[in-house]
Each structure stands twice: as structure tokens, then as C-alpha cells.
Image (cartoon, rainbow, N blue to C red):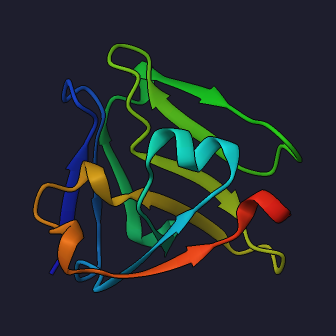
Amino acid sequence: MPYEGSCHCGKVTFSVDADPPLEAMTCNCSHCSRKGFVLTFVPAAQFTLKSGADALGSYEFYKHKIDHQFCTTCGTQAFAASAMPDGTEMRAVNLRCVPEVDIDTLKITKVDGASF
């Protein structure tokens, strides 16, 4: 069953053609920890940007391999785009932007991104 999410102001909306996840990850890198992300990763083919392409800004840092996209109106980063080492295009979905996901029920894996 697909799930949907959005930025805070609602200009940027998306859907993911998959069941809502039961697991997610957090990262302690300077970017993720400051923004409080709770992330799941999906193949780009399962991710649809429904609205707001014209409202997106982009931020890259460190190795510039992840395109952190955010709403230029409210500043919310609902997702990011990147490729896996094998070239598979992926989307990192910020589950804090998916109202139907209860963060407190997820199995969380902590990633030590600060050491990368």
C-alpha cells in the first residue's frame, strides 16, 4: 500500500509505491543530526514527486554524492536523491514528513555517519 508525505507547507508532496516501513535509520553526521532525520531508502522507481518540483532547492556537502532537496518556502527536507555504489538510483525519505508513520513504533538502526 503506497504512502505519501510532504514538506511542512505542503508545496512539495510525494508518494512511495511500497508499504510504510517498519524499520528506519538515524545518522549522527553533522547534517542528519542537526535536522533530526529518520530515514528509509527506496528505489527511485518507487518514488514519485507529485508536486513542488519548482519549489525545491538543493544542498550538497562532503563528497557531493547526495542531493539533499528541500522546500524553498518552508525549508523542510522531505527527501534526498543519490545513487548506490552499483549505480542504482535511490531516494532517502525523511519519515518525519510522512504523517501515517509512527516514528516511535519503528525499529531504528543507528549509523555512525560522523566517522565516514
Q: Is residue 78 above or below residue 95?
A: above
Residue drawn 30% across the image and 33% down it:
12
Query: In the image, is 56 to the left or to the right of 113?
Result: left
In the image as oriented, which residue stretches furthest toward the top?
73
Residue drawn 41% across the image and 61% down it:
38
At which x and y percent is residue 88?
Answer: 70, 75
Quadrant hosting residue 73? top left
Residue drawn 63% across the image and 73% down it:
111
Say how many tags the image has: 0
Quadrant hosting residue 100? bottom left
Q: In this view, does 92 lie above or below 63?
A: below
At which x and y percent is residue 21?
Answer: 30, 81
Q: Quadrant of the N terminus?
A: bottom left
At which x and y percent is residue 36?
Answer: 43, 48
Q: Is residue 37 above or below residue 78?
A: below
Residue drawn 53% across the image and 61% down it:
91
Query: In the image, is 67 to the left or to the right of 32?
Result: right
Query: In the image, is 82 to the left or to the right of 34?
Result: right
Q: Quadrant of the C terminus?
A: bottom right
Query: In the image, is 65 to the left or to the right of 92?
Result: right
Quadrant hosting residue 71? top left
Q: Is residue 92 above or below residue 19?
A: above
At which x and y percent is residue 52?
Answer: 34, 29
